Image (cartoon, rainbow, N blue to C red):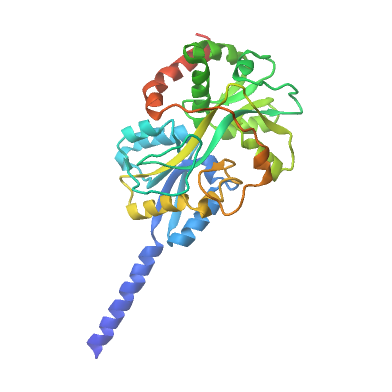
């Protein structure tokens, strides 16, 4: 009888221990700071996934997407990241070359981005076209092309991001290269006089812009939706460029060193669901890569819709990124 009693107690303890262990599961996600800001997607994504998985999500935020890759390279196999969210297609070839990422093994349905995207290691979660956002109260004649931006009035300044640390900064670098080719260095030399400052990441650049430090900033065609929906103003708009716009497709992947690969995979699966995708438009202010529970707000229908999309193959970016950044540095320093 006593043995039966202790067997029952032991079984109950095992169940409780198992339950506690399940509750103690932790998923560490590296991402960029604006994603985990109180106004970003992070808090809602954390709450929704923790409810579904019975686990804890720990965010680790860095300034911008390029810095994510830099940090991973520094940490190597000692990284604490289980999932990395916030790289984009311009960085995935270089990210794969680190040997730190594992194939996701998923075949999600309903993920669609302009031009299509499919990869065995990284999954897209949103996208947006880069654009020059301007203040309609201070700039009455915004540039209508990249050429007009490069050759325009030097008194009308723009804030841009650094391509060494920022995915928008890298996007602008590739946009200029896509349009100007071998003449990109000369184009940067002309544009230099219009650049008020170069910031490490998007948040700093956009903050300077909204504070009135410059009438233009490099951001996304989706940025005006935030101002229309959250602030009820149409003051800030995107300039439509006749040559076309470079697209950013943001992706996430799981690391080979993930403490709980099944949990990391579960997060990637959740990321493709309508529960996650529905959070993106009005928190990350990007276009969702998958179906949402409801139609997008009407403001998204009024955004600039590029007639041409630029996107370089990841391998081309990996092969040339350093040389093109050196070209940018030389032009911006006047050497």
Residue 126 rendering spot, x and y as whole percentages: 51, 41
Taking the view exactly as shown, the residue that stands out farthest to the top is 335
Residue 187 appearing in the image: yes
Q: Residue at x 48, y 38 (%)?
A: 250
Residue 201 rendering spot, x and y as whole percentages: 54, 32
Q: Quadrant of residue 3?
A: bottom left
Q: Residue at x 59, y 45 (%)?
A: 281
| Relative to 204, 227 lies left or right | right
Residue 109 rendering spot, x and y as whole percentages: 44, 49
Image height check: is 4 above or below 183? below
| Relative to 237, 4 lies left or right | left
| Relative to 115, 296 lies left or right | right
Quadrant (top left/top right/bottom left/bottom right) for the N terminus: bottom left
The mark tally for this picture is: 0
Taking the view exactly as shown, the residue that stands out farthest to the left is 3
Residue 86 rendering spot, x and y as whole percentages: 47, 39
Taking the view exactly as shown, the residue that stands out farthest to the bottom is 1
Q: Residue at x 34, y 68 (%)?
A: 18
Q: Residue at x 49, y 42 (%)?
A: 112
């Amino acid at each position: 009888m006593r043995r039966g009693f202790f067997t029952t107690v032991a079984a109950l303890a095992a169940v409780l221990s198992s339950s506690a262990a399940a509750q103690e599961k932790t998923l560490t996600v590296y991402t960029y700071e604006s994603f985990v800001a109180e106004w970003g997607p992070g808090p809602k994504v954390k709450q929704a996934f923790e409810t579904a998985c019975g686990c804890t999500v720990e965010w680790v935020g860095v300034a911008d997407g390029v810095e994510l890759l830099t940090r991973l390279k520094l940490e190597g196999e000692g990284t604490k990241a289980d999932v990395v969210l916030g790289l984009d297609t311009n960085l995935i070839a270089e990210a794969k070359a680190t040997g730190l990422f594992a194939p996701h093994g998923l075949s999600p349905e309903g993920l669609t981005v302009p031009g299509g995207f499919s990869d065995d290691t990284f999954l897209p979660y949103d996208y947006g076209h880069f654009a020059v956002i301007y203040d309609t109260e201070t700039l009455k004649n915004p540039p209508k092309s990249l050429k007009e931006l490069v050759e325009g009035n030097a008194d009308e300044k723009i804030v841009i991001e650094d391509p060494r640390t920022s995915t928008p900064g890298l996007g602008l670098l590739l946009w200029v290269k896509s349009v100007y080719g071998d003449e990109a260095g000369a184009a940067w030399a002309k544009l230099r006089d219009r650049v008020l400052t170069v910031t490490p990441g998007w948040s700093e650049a956009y903050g300077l812009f909204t504070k009135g430090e410059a009438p233009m900033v490099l951001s996304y065609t989706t940025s005006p939706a935030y101002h229309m929906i959250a602030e009820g103003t149409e003051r800030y708009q995107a300039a439509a460029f006749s040559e076309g716009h470079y697209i950013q497709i943001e992706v996430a992947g799981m690391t080979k060193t993930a403490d709980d690969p099944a949990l990391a995979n579960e997060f990637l699966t959740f990321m493709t669901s309508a529960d996650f995708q529905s959070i993106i438009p009005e928190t990350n202010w990007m276009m969702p890569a998958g179906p949402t529970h409801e139609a997008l707000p009407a403001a998204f229908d009024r955004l600039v819709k590029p007639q041409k999309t630029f996107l370089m193959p990841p391998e081309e970016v990996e092969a040339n990124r350093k040389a093109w950044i050196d070209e940018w540095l030389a032009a911006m320093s006047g050497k």
